[in-house]
Image: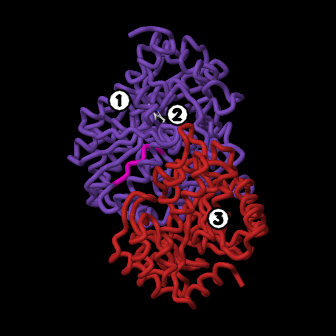
């Protein structure tokens, strides 16, 4: 069975919600990033979103853009990101990994080899922010054929009419972006989130995870009360940034402080 | 995918694009995050409605005539022609427009659309500051608050325009993310737009971005070519033979080229920023001559990028040409071979800038100075009856500090 489906099913059976973590591959350097990645499941991550760094991440805020740039400066590229997933899979066969990013690095890889190598490396799904349903033929459909899930973002501006287009071909889970805006800049409004999650769930049997703006255990708990999963990204990326020395290099604290934040934020979801 | 294979081989017209999904062959499209998608669809619907509304065109024509000062003259550059010894060189004088460049053509069109859509706030990106000034100008004219995103590096090299925008009441927000140039300003403007979806209208300054921007901006700029056509017919009794325009994102070039695309006798040259030379890695901004197809800012087009698909900043002496992409329609015109794309270096542009100033008494912006640099090479190879029109897209007042610095002079 597909790792993503399995995780959501197991969690549902235990009446628990998924804790989904986002980090950028190669941030702040390839070795530290792999150490963090390997530590995420034990710290509480049920699903891992691994960012594929891009120089121009238009839908992300400053924190995640800086993470991308740190990774790129440290020499990260798509080959290394896929190698990182392979290295993770050497010791973990169960935690789903979803690669998240922008189309251009995939487009020039090119698409066909990227999809084949991602599937072979042990990637479970893709979130590609700037490929809308209108362009499904070029990335989404080939990815689905290769057995990868294609997870789509829905947003507060996705009206009922568009929701149909967005949900077609979406698989794995639906990622509801709780704010109009870029990552990490605003706090989500719970009532609106609940309403929108219900609106999405009325149209699909897929689990719905909610992200963009979750920073505290309280927010995680309240989002979890209205969704199937909570995504935390900027809070982790900020923790990485704060742990660096004045030359921007990783310190002994980098991996441990990020994993500590994962433990803290995921705790409310484990207590159920 | 092989871009050439995607291009229809037997075209009846080069002027029918884009298709319904915003594609020019392989290029263009709507590669945006879902947050933006409904906004872009709304904009497209509003633009389609405006396009067939005579009152929209009447209002735009009135503003073009009485506010922007159109039509801009088609000027026979007699001394330059003599100096070069070849083609008969004309300038399309877009630098005489209100605000000093072609950018106002597009801004007037888009602000009228913003008004129709009931939007209450205007945002824009700018590189050289010409689009920022034009946007701030029309925002002042229509009483709308306006935020201009401008790279910190560009703010440094285009100070007069920054001051102009502030005088016009715009808030200029320096962009320090990324490399602090035009592409980052565009990222920042897109981020603003997704964060303020209800009330904000984003006036993109060139024929790039997601559909419908490339087609819409082209349509508003096509007045340049339409006038050129009439003016040349009046002056010489026939169409021009050669068109030359500088290429940043490609709007002034598309504006003058588009009305002539189906006139097979008219040859067209787009001049990219060759910077320090096309052989210098990351030393130029020639997306078509030194880039590869990719996806950025909502469309597929030729981009300056590394092997991993990361966008390069490029380099040009001209802040207005310093963009790692190019409008998707140009990518398509390149692949079809209808337009020839060449480049001019910083040095060549500076030389042309000085030549034009001295012998025509026109201080060109550094952007059209690139076009002129190519004209100085091309014109001497053409016969005297070849009618060549260069788009003088802007005036050089904004550039005098940068030029002085390059020439080692104090102002
Ligand atoms: C005078 C002038 N010409 C040309 C350009 C380049 O833009 P485009 O290629 O869209 O005409 C600019 C951009 O700022 C400009 O100010």
Residue B9, position as x, y percentages in the image = 71, 55
Which chain did the renderer colour purple?
A: B
Do callouts 3 and 1 point to residues on the same chain?
no
In the rendered image, residue B203 lying in the magenta stretch gets the answer yes
Tag 3 and tag 1, C-beta contact below 8 Å: no
Residue B187, position as x, y percentages in the image = 47, 48
Mark in front: 2 vs 3: 3
Residue A187 falls left or right of residue B78:
left
Which chain did the renderer colour red?
A: A
Q: CA distance from mark 3 to mark 1?
A: 51 Å
Q: Earlier in the sequence, mark 1 or mark 2?
A: 1
Residue displayed at 46% across by 53% down: A61
Residue B314, position as x, y percentages in the image = 59, 34
Question: What is the quadrant of residue A156 in the picture?
Answer: bottom left
Mark in front: 3 vs 1: 3
Mark 1 residue crowding within 10 angstroms, few (<14) / some (14–19) / many (20+): many
The kind of secondary structure element at disc 1 is helix
- Range drawn in magenta: B201-206
Which secondary structure is most common in the magenta stretch? loop
Question: What is the quadrant of residue A226 in the picture?
Answer: bottom left
Residue displayed at 70% across by 81% down: A2
Q: Which residue is mark 1?
A: B161
Mark drawn on residue B321: 2
Residue displayed at 65% across by 62% down: A37
Q: Which residue is mark 3?
A: A39
> Is residue B220 visible to us here?
yes
């Amino acid at each position: 069975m597909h790792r993503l489906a399995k995780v959501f099913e197991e969690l549902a059976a235990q009446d628990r919600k998924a804790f989904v973590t986002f980090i950028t591959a190669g941030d702040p350097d390839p070795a530290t990033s792999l150490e963090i990645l390997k530590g995420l499941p034990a710290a509480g991550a049920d699903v891992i979103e691994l960012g594929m760094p891009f120089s121009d991440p238009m839908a992300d805020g400053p924190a995640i853009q800086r993470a991308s740039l740190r990774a790129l400066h440290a020499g990260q590229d798509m080959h290394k990101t896929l190698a990182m997933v392979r290295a993770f899979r050497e010791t973990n066969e169960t935690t789903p990994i979803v690669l998240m990013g922008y189309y251009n690095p995939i487009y020039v890889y090119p698409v066909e080899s990227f999809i084949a190598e991602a599937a072979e490396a042990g990637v479970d799904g893709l979130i590609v922010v700037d490929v809308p349903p209108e362009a499904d033929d070029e990335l989404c459909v080939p990815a689905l054929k290769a057995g990868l899930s294609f997870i789509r973002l829905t947003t507060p501006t996705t009206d009922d009419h568009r929701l149909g287009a967005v949900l077609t071909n979406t698989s794995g889970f639906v990622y509801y972006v709780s704010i109009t805006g870029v990552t990490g800049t605003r706090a989500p409004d719970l009532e609106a989130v609940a309403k929108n999650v219900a609106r999405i769930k009325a149209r699909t049997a897929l689990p719905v995870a909610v992200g963009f703006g979750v920073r505290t255990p309280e927010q995680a708990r309240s989002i979890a009360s209205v969704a199937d999963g909570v995504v935390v990204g900027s809070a982790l990326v900020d923790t990485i940034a704060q742990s660096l020395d004045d030359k921007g290099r990783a310190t002994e604290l980098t991996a441990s402080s990020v994993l500590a934040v994962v433990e803290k934020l995921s705790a409310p979801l484990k207590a159920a | 995918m092989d871009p050439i294979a995607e291009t229809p081989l037997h075209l009846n017209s080069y002027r029918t694009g884009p298709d319904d999904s915003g594609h020019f062959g392989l290029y263009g499209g709507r590669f945006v995050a879902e947050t933006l998608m409904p906004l872009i669809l709304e904009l497209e619907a509003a633009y389609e409605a405006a396009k067939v509304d005579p009152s929209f065109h009447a209002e735009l024509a009135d503003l073009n005539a009485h506010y922007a000062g159109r039509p801009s003259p088609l000027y026979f550059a007699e001394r330059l022609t003599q100096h070069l010894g070849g083609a008969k060189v004309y300038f399309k004088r877009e630098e005489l427009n209100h605000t000093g460049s072609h950018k106002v053509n597009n801004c007037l069109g888009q602000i009228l659309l913003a008004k129709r859509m009931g939007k209450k706030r205007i945002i824009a990106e700018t590189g050289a500051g010409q689009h920022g000034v034009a946007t701030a100008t029309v925002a002042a004219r229509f009483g709308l608050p306006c935020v201009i995103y401008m790279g910190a590096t560009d703010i440094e090299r285009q100070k007069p325009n920054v001051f102009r925008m502030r005088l016009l009441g715009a808030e200029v927000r320096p962009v320090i993310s990324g490399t602090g140039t035009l592409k980052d300003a565009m990222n920042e403007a897109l981020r603003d737009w997704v964060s303020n979806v209800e009330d904000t209208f984003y006036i993109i300054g060139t024929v790039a971005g997601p559909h419908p921007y490339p087609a819409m901006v082209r349509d508003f700029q096509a007045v340049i070519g339409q006038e050129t056509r009439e003016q040349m017919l009046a002056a010489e009794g026939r169409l021009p033979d050669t068109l030359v325009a500088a290429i940043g994102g490609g709007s002034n070039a598309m504006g003058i080229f588009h009305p002539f695309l189906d006139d097979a006798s008219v040859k067209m040259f787009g001049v990219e920023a060759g910077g320090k030379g096309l052989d210098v890695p990351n030393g130029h901004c020639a997306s078509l001559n030194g880039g590869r197809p990719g996806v950025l800012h909502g469309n597929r087009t030729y981009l300056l990028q590394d092997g991993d698909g990361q966008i390069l900043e490029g380099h040009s002496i001209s802040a207005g040409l310093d963009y790692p992409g190019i409008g998707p329609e140009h990518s398509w015109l390149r692949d079809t071979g209808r337009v020839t794309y060449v480049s001019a270096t910083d040095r060549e542009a500076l030389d042309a800038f000085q030549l034009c100033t001295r012998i025509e008494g026109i201080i060109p912006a550094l952007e059209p100075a690139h076009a002129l640099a190519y004209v100085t090479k091309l014109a001497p190879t053409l016969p005297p009856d070849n009618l060549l029109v260069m788009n003088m897209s802007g005036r050089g007042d904004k550039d005098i500090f940068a030029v002085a610095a390059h020439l080692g002079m104090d102002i």
